[in-house]
Image (cartoon, grey):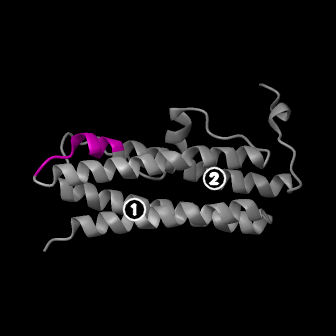
Amino acid sequence: MADTKALQTPTDLNRNDTKSVADALNSALADSFALYFKTKNFHWHVSGPHFRDYHLLLDDQAAQIYGVTDAIAERVRKTGNVTIRSIGDIARRQTIQDNDADFVAPGDMLAELRDDNLKLVESFRAVKQAAEDAGDNATSGIVDEWTDQAEERAWFLFEASRKG
């Protein structure tokens, strides 16, 4: 087993408290990667009369999701902990389910991604609570923006899927 002490970034936060924050962050990170890949999958495979609109929407959303992953992982490291290291690690931690179906109707894609973004909001709320319990005001503050972005994505997916 490697010496993980070399990776213990200095922090004034309690190590036991930061471990719970890191666990919540790593769960949210795994969900972010799962959602990113699912969003790209649907981006690549969307079809139908709204193809262009959905294709572009999903590409924009995937880029936003991916853009947050580095900030999440770096927050874990700033608290003196280690973050996920592999696709297998993501698979063990993710709560957002993959979709390997050969075909998914565009409306079902939007609905599934809407629900998944709301599930990610739940993960971010767990991060917020763990951070507040640990007195980690930096994590508590930064997670608000991630939550807002996920809520906005869910809203756009909801509105794009409305009929009439």
User: Disc 1 marks which amino acid?
Assistant: Arg
Q: Amino acid at mark 2?
A: Leu
What's the residue at 28%, 49% (across, down)?
56
Drawn side of residue 48 relative to residue 131, left or right: left
Q: Nearer the viewer, mark 1 or mark 2?
A: 1
Query: Which residue reaches farthest top?
Result: 1
154 vs 50, left or right, is right
Which residue bears the numbered disc 1? 153
Image quadrant where residue 111 sits: bottom left
**Prevailing secondary structure class for the magenta stretch in the rendered image:** helix
Q: Residue furthest bottom?
A: 164
95 sits to left or right of 97: right
Residue 11 position, x and y percent, is: 86, 50
Q: Is residue 44 magenta?
A: yes
Mark 1 crowdedness (10 Å alpha carbons): few <14, some 14-19, many ≥20? many
- Quarter of image, res 123: bottom right
Circle 1 sits in a helix, a strand or a loop, which is it?
A: helix
Residue 82, image x, y percentages: 71, 40
Q: Which mark is residue 25?
A: 2
Which span of residues is magenta-colored?
Answer: 40-48
Please give the name of the residue rendered at 22% of the width and 54% of the height, measured from the top-left corner: 53
Q: Residue at 83%, 39% (x, y): give it.
A: 8
Q: Which mark is residue 98?
A: none
Q: Residue 59: x and y, percent?
A: 34, 46
Q: How many numbered circles does the render carry?
A: 2
39 or 100, which is in the foreground?
39
Query: Distance of mark 1 from mark 2, alpha carbons?
Result: 20 Å
Secondary structure state at the residue bearing disc 2: helix
